[in-house]
Amino acid sequence: MPKLPIVTQEVGYAIKAEMEREPGNQYVVGLLERLESENPCIAEFISQLALQHDDPVAISTAALLVYRLLESQLEADDMKDQFKKE
């Protein structure tokens, strides 16, 4: 079974920079919209979980950012592996 990637500090900084380029909650809203089309089960899970808490925005933001961190690290690892093969 494939393991989840270990997120590096560099990827964390990159995601933080991505998030800061967009005003307000636009980054998180965009992530949720993309996730709804690419992985609707996870998007629904995050939305339903968030609604069960006092601060649904914080819950959904945290979940979406963790998803993006893992996704971005996987992309970085794939690129690194491709460079090794060349």
Image (tube, rainbow, N blue to C red):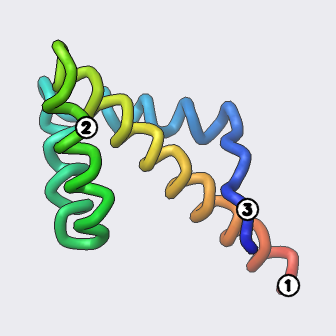
Residue lying furthest bottom: 86
Callout 2–callout 1 Cβ contact below 8 Å: no
* Residue in the image at 18% along x and 43% along y: 48
Viewer-side residue, 13 vs 63: 63
Q: Identify the residue at image location x=47%, y=40%.
A: 66
Q: Report crowding for label 1: few under 14, some 14 to 19, many 20 or more residues within 10 A (C-alpha).
A: few
Instruction: Report the side of 67 relative to 70 (left or right).
Output: left
Marks 3 and 2, how far apart in space?
24 Å
Residue that mark 2 sits on: 49
Q: Earlier in the sequence, mark 2 or mark 1?
A: 2
Amino acid type at mark 3: Lys
Looking at the rendering, in which quadrant would you find the C terminus?
Answer: bottom right
Helix, strand or loop at mark 3: loop
The structure residue drawn at horizontal position 61% and vertical position 53%, both measured from the top left corner, is 73
Circle 1 residue:
85
Instruction: Determine whether the residue tagged by mark 1 lies in a helix, strand or loop.
Output: helix
Indicate which disc residue 3 carries.
3
The image shows residue 41, relative to residue 16, as above or below, that is below
| Residue drawn at point x = 18 percent, y = 63 percent | 36
Q: Where is residue 20, by image quadrant? A: top left
Badge 2 element: helix
